[in-house]
Image: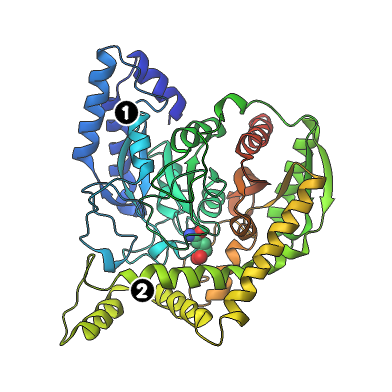
Amino acid sequence: MKTAQSIAREVQSGESSASAELDNSLSAIRARDEELNVFLYVDEEGARATAASIDERVARGEDVGPLAGVPIAIKDNMCQTGIPTTCSSKILEGWRPPYNATVIDRLIAAGAVPVGKTNLDEFAMGSSTENSAFGPTRNPLDPSRVPGGSSGGSAAAVAANMTPLALGSDTGGSIRQPAALCGLIGMKPSYGLVSRYGLIAFASSLDQIGPFSKNVMDAAILLEAIAGHDPLDSTSLPEPSPSLVAHVNDGVAGKRIALVRELVEGADEDVVISVNRAVEALKDAGATIVELSIPEFRLGLSAYYLIAPAEASSNLARYDGVRYGLRVDAEDVAAMNEATRTAGFGAEVKRRIMLGTYALSAGYFDAYYGQALKVRTRMIDAFKRAYQQADLLIGATTPSVAFAFGTKTSDPMSMYLSDVFTIPTNLAGEAAVSVPFGTGEAGLPVGVQLLGPGRSEAQLFAAARVLEIAEDRS
Ligand code: GLN
């Protein structure tokens, strides 16, 4: 499949057209979607209209934008006017948002063509897409295995060449982890860089939207197009979109990069081998490598599984059978609320709501939620100290390559551990990218994670590009 960058160039120059590129994308979807269960909804009609209007504007000599005619897949927890948006939950079945998420408006302004909504773990809670109410997505590289989660559908869309780009959301790892398992670039931007307006909330202090792509340049183009201040999101950084594309080839010469012991601890051997090879590649490109231990990283998982469920229990209170989607009628309002929530939410979502409600309840607040917030502050301090010794950090994205269906569904704790290396970044509100580097068990891709302080996206892409070049050469 062509890169997003080359599609945009060809559409803008008239060598190709948005409509022809969309046709390619739709036939790739038709070829494998039944097998892989990637899309919950394909907006063929809307996408055709968007593509046709781009082609008309090109014909009139207009500059359509950096993503001219590029098909893109959208995780189904982002609102698009009139398009069914489910969060892979029965509770939202049939709901059509009356407005666009800011990212959708920005994609359209950049010339992109949203083709449809992708599968996810219900309300983005999970690491394998097995928690979707509409069945799991399969990993295009090995359909007997999971694509990761929660943005598994978006990762699979790009891995299966259905679209060159996709958007996901990352609360504890949900972009980086599926990117690692599907062999893609996936970035969690700094908190506040990309507007959350129209992203259906899971844990508002952690959620961020970010890009999936097959190569670093495409991810940089996409992130640059969607980032930047949005007055509709009160947590949006008060700055314009950073310059990322211009820095992709900056390299790492003179940078200090720290290999973090806790970011490889417990990982499978094939994963550790790839991380060590990536460290060598960065060294060969002129980086200085140091080794660090950040023991606070071991506390991330426990703090996350109090903070995220606590916020979720509050955010998900709005699904009451009155305002959105599903309603199961009963004798009075309270009984209707209960019947609707019982029927509409899946097991993992119920587990999180109960954990969160308990963590916030009177008498337990200080011991659980309050304690987790203290750990979060320690995590932020630990990162700050690390960035006095290094510009960027490196480790694994996930403990293993893509796993088989059913291997972790009976034990929530083992599923939660899939995000042990990605969670610290979310708690600190910082940025990190997963880069495919080498293969492990069964020839499946391994993801190496680069972490940076807030607003280090340009540096992270530059380091990711060094690994991409090293990988192409080997
Ligand atoms: N797997 C983690 C969870 O289930 C992270 C999910 C996410 O980033 N959306 O909470």
Which numbered circle lies on residue 21?
A: 1
Residue 350: image quadrant is bottom left
Give percent across and percent down for residue 80: 28, 47
- Can residue 266 be spotted in the picture? no
Q: Residue at x 64, y 37 (%)?
A: 464
Query: The N terminus appears in which quarter of the rendering?
Result: top left
- Can residue 220 be spotted in the picture? yes
| Few, some or many residues within 10 Å of mark 2 (<14, 14–19, 20+) | some
Of the two numbered discs 1 and 2 on the same chain, state the one appearing first in sequence.
1
Give percent across and percent down for residue 281: 75, 36
Q: Is residue 251 left or right of residue 27?
A: right
* Mark 2 lies on residue: 346
Give percent across and percent down for residue 59: 25, 13
Residue 297: image quadrant is bottom right
Mark 1 C-beta closer than 8 Å to ligand 1: no
Identify the coloring: rainbow
Q: Is residue 297 above or below residue 306?
A: above
Q: In this view, does 71 lie to the left or right of 427?
A: left
Residue 151: image quadrant is bottom left
* Front residue of 230 and 65: 230
Q: Which residue is drawn at 52% across and 37% down?
A: 239
Circle 1: residue type:
Glu
Q: Is residue 250 above or below residue 331?
A: above
Query: The C terminus appears in which quarter of the rendering?
Result: top right
Q: What element carries label 2?
A: loop
Q: In this view, does 275 lie to the left or right of 128?
A: right
Which numbered circle lies on residue 232?
A: none
Mark 2 C-beta closer than 8 Å to ligand 1: no
Q: What element carries label 1?
A: helix
